[in-house]
Image: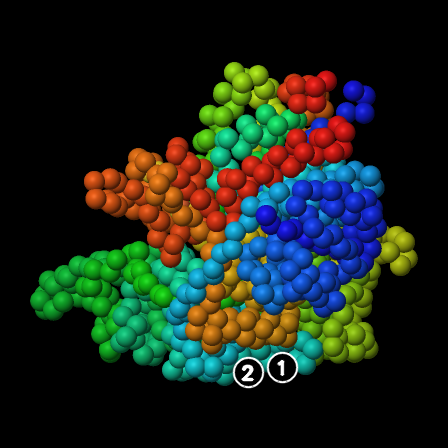
């Protein structure tokens, strides 16, 4: 267990957080390699089922990154995602997952440094929570 | 079964320096349905693309995964490769192993390699489910909108107009001209600013293809490349511009004076005013907030009748106006009027704002003898409050000593971290103009360092030094007000490594160039991102400097960051040429990444209908049953409907639920097994 590292799935909106992640690259801002991004056109298209699927498949943390309120490329997809996300958080406990395993934040295309910092910090918080309990079943451990 | 080819780019050292290509190759080769794995120094180069095309021609692969940099810049490149290779161009998926991997995990080579494997696994999983799509074409409205009519916006508008396209040129001020109209002279040639700018202003005002919408603000922007619908609010002028001839009689007649924005508040204008003498269009505006409503003449009321003569009593402005343009009985709407424009492309040239002196408490900003450089420009200009005579506004004396302070608000983490770029040169220019007007005046410039990169700039600097302008290297800590209206400048001189003090009659602050007021809101309306400093962000610093992340919207000049006039004009002309391409083509291809509803799965519940921000979904009846249908011309592809549909009837092409779930699986279960976590 000592060499355990989290596995974190990030859903990043193409218009903001995905750009922010690219900018982190351009600025060479390091963050843990435990983070992998799935590009989506808008957080509004992230079904709660996706987040649950990631957790059920063993992801230790799931992060959803969207545009700041008012900045959505599609007017208000981010607001709709935020409303759905709030609901999802309440049912996670019932499903046996720590609600803090999932997080949603607004990171714009110009916040490359902030993207890296947020990822570093989220990774640390997942390390504190520990491995996804489901991992034991998947890997038969 | 799809045959997937994986192409791994080294990007020179950029990727290969952190990621073990051999290990990644071996991993990719073991993924299901991967038939070919290749790597190359630069996948986007001709030989790199040729590798893919060759495999397509030989029918070795029919789905392509390129593991390289970001799809935001390079997806179009590889889509074209597929097209050239005879495959539907939407059958490519990129794994971003540079910007989001090697560059950020450079110190964790093993982690970077494992992550590259995961990202490729994710891309392969999605590629397996990619489907061929057909792009749509939209007709382009052959007109353009230029926001901001400073020197940048004017050149952009003129170019497009000369090419034969209709241009709407919008500015928030009554006249075109922008900041440049306020300058006295321009470096490095010391041309008189007005002499080179006013002919351009006249040309813009007279061009048959340019429609000027001055004293106007952008209200909203809808639509996309080819068909933007823009609402522009024409602010209320309270003067009928169709009749106003710009004679200025009303201005002379108006009894009330208020601070003049054009002269940086150093002079007064009337409550009814023409922005400046060379204004284009030359029309009067009533500043309703300051209008006294003389003779009880509120707008929209009938004049009262004189108690003795029985004649109507008019306000002075309307009394003198010979054309009837200034008629106060008209009930003007204070909100002005909204006009709707249809344009194919938009250029944003909203310019900059010179920072105010008041945040700099350490420099005694309350003193009338501490001024900003833009204020000095007005003092030097023949059209300014002193008719170009250099004298202090506090007492009318010609200063014996003038001290300039550089980088006020620039290169300063408390204000703006960036360099405003033009200040070094304009300070030297202003110093030179002071010396020319008053050769006996002592001129000191306090610099952090002198930045004169630019054609003929260093020569200009040396010339100024030869004129006797004294340059002191070091930051100024404070400016104190002394008795007798003198000022004391306290600084640290780096060259003598000690503090210096200097008494001066006039202190000029070279304040920073900032994003113009309201740029954030404008950016929001346009859907364009602002950078961390608040200026608009270009699509790519080097390769797409005038494009933005929104197709069909371009930027030029200082709205993108501080620039001098030659650079702004060059960008204006670059932006006009970029904005003309869609107009010339007449139609543009748009990605078919829109949503579609599977009529078999749809239950007709209607949940999606009100959620769509573009009102693209309608419920239609198919005989007895109700079903939802999406108008693909209206759909922007946000996927909100897809995420909300309880029947999973909506498919967002390019990002289907199945594709995303396959990626999730690849990043979790599949990767977990592979990396033994
Ligand atoms: S939400 Fe789904 S099922 Fe309901 S109308 Fe829309 S597409 Fe049909
Ligand atoms: S994807 Fe977005 S824009 Fe398209 S129909 Fe669905 S909700 Fe409307």
Total labels drawn: 2
The answer to whether residue B483 shows anywhere in this view is no
Front in this rendered view, residue B289 or B457: B457
At horizontal 59% and vertical 80% (from top left) the residue drawn is B192
The answer to whether residue B463 shows anywhere in this view is yes
Q: Residues within 10 Å of mark 2 (few under 14, many from 20)?
A: few
Q: Secondary structure at mark 2?
A: helix
In the displayed structure image, the side of residue B296 where residue B525 appears, left or right: right
Residue B320 percent coordinates (x, y): 26, 75
Residue B363 percent coordinates (x, y): 68, 52
Q: Is residue B17 above or below residue B181?
A: above
In the displayed structure image, the side of residue B635 where residue B581 appears, left or right: right
Q: Which mark is residue B195?
A: 2
Q: Which mark is residue B191?
A: 1
Q: Chain of mark 2?
A: B
Q: Chain of mark 1?
A: B
Q: Is residue B540 above or below residue B438?
A: above
At horizontal 68% and vertical 48% (from top left) the residue drawn is B34
Which quadrant holds the N terminus of chain A? top right
Asked whether the residues under the numbered discs 1 and 2 touch, taking CB atoms below 8 Å apart as contact, a structural biologist would say yes
In the displayed structure image, the side of residue A58 where residue B588 appears, left or right: left
Residues at discs 1 and 2 both on one chain: yes
Q: How is the image coloured?
A: rainbow
In which image quadrant can residue B306 be found? bottom left
In which image quadrant can residue A58 be found? top right
């Amino acid at each position: 267990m000592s060499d355990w590292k989290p596995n974190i799935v990030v859903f990043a909106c193409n218009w903001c957080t995905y750009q922010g992640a690219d900018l982190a690259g351009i600025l060479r801002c390091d963050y843990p390699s435990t983070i992998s991004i799935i590009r989506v056109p808008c957080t509004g298209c992230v079904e709660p089922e996706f987040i649950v699927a990631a957790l059920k498949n063993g992801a230790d943390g799931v992060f959803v990154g969207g545009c700041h309120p008012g900045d959505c490329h599609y007017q208000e997809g981010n607001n709709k995602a935020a409303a759905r996300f709030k609901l999802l958080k309440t049912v996670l406990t019932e499903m046996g997952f720590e609600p803090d395993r999932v997080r949603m934040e607004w990171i714009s295309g110009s916040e490359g440094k902030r993207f890296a910092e947020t990822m570093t910090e989220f990774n640390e918080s997942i390390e504190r929570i520990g491995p996804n309990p489901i991992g034991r079943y998947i890997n038969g451990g | 079964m799809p045959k997937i080819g994986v192409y791994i780019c080294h990007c020179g050292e950029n990727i290969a320096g952190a990621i073990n290509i051999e290990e990644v190759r071996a991993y990719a080769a073991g993924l299901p349905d991967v038939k070919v794995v290749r790597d190359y120094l630069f996948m986007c180069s001709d030989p790199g693309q040729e590798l893919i095309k060759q495999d397509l021609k030989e029918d070795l692969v029919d789905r392509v995964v390129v593991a390289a940099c970001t799809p935001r810049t390079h997806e179009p490149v590889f889509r074209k490769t597929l097209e050239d290779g005879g495959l539907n161009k939407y059958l490519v998926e990129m794994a971003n192993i540079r910007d989001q991997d090697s560059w950020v995990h450079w110190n964790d080579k093993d982690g970077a390699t494992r992550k590259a494997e995961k990202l490729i696994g994710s891309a392969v999983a999605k590629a397996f489910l990619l489907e061929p799509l057909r792009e749509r074409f939209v007709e382009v409205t052959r007109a353009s909108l230029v926001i901001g009519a400073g020197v940048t916006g004017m050149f952009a508008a003129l170019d497009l107009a000369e090419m034969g396209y209709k241009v709407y040129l919008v500015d928030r001020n009554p006249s075109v001209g922008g900041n440049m109209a306020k300058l006295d002279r321009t470096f490095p040639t010391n041309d008189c600013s007005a002499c080179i700018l006013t002919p351009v202003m006249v040309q813009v005002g007279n061009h048959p293809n340019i429609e000027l919408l001055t004293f106007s603000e952008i209200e909203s922007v809808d639509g996309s490349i080819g068909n933007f619908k823009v609402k522009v609010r024409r602010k209320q002028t309270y003067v009928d511009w169709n009749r106003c001839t710009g004679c200025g009689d009303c201005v002379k007649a108006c009894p009330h004076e208020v601070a003049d924005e054009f002269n940086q508040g150093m002079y007064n204008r009337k409550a009814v005013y023409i922005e400046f003498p060379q204004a284009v269009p030359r029309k009067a505006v009533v500043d309703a907030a300051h209008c006294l409503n003389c003779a009880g003449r509120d707008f929209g009321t009938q004049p009262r009748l004189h108690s003795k003569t029985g004649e109507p009593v008019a306000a002075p402005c309307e009394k003198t106006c010979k054309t009837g343009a200034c008629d106060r009985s008209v009930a003007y709407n204070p909100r002005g009027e909204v006009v709707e424009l249809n344009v194919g492309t938009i250029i944003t040239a909203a310019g900059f704002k010179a920072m105010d002196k008041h945040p700099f408490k350490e420099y005694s900003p309350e003193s009338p003898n501490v001024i900003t450089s833009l204020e000095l420009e007005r003092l030097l200009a023949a059209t300014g409050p002193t008719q170009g005579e250099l004298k202090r506004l506090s007492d009318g004396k010609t200063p014996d000593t003038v001290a300039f302070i550089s980088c006020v608000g620039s290169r300063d983490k408390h204000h703006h971290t960036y360099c405003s770029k033009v200040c070094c040169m304009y300070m030297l220019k202003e110093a030179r103009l002071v010396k020319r007007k008053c050769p006996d005046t002592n001129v000191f410039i306090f610099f952090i360092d002198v930045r004169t990169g630019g054609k003929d700039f260093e020569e200009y600097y040396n010339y100024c030094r030869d004129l006797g302008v004294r340059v002191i290297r070091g930051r100024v800590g404070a400016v104190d007000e002394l008795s007798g209206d003198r000022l004391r400048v306290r600084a640290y001189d780096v060259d003598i490594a000690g503090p210096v003090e200097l008494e001066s009659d006039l202190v000029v602050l070279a304040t920073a160039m900032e994003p113009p007021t309201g740029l954030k809101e404008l950016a929001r309306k346009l859907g364009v991102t602002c950078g961390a400093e608040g200026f608009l962000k270009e699509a790519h610093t080097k390769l797409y400097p005038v494009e933005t992340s929104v197709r069909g919207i371009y930027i030029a000049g200082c709205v993108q960051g501080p620039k001098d006039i030659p650079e702004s004009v060059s960008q204006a002309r670059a932006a006009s040429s970029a904005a003309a391409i869609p107009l010339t083509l007449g139609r543009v291809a748009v990605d078919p990444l829109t949503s579609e509803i599977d009529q078999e799965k749809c239950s007709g519940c209607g949940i999606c209908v009100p959620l769509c921000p573009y009102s693209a979904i309608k419920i239609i009846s198919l005989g007895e049953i109700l079903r939802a249908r999406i108008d693909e011309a209206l759909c922007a592809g946000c996927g909100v409907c897809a995420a909300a549909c309880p029947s999973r009837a909506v498919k967002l092409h390019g990002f289907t639920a199945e594709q995303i779930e396959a990626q999730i699986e690849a990043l979790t279960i599949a990767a977990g097994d592979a990396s033994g976590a």
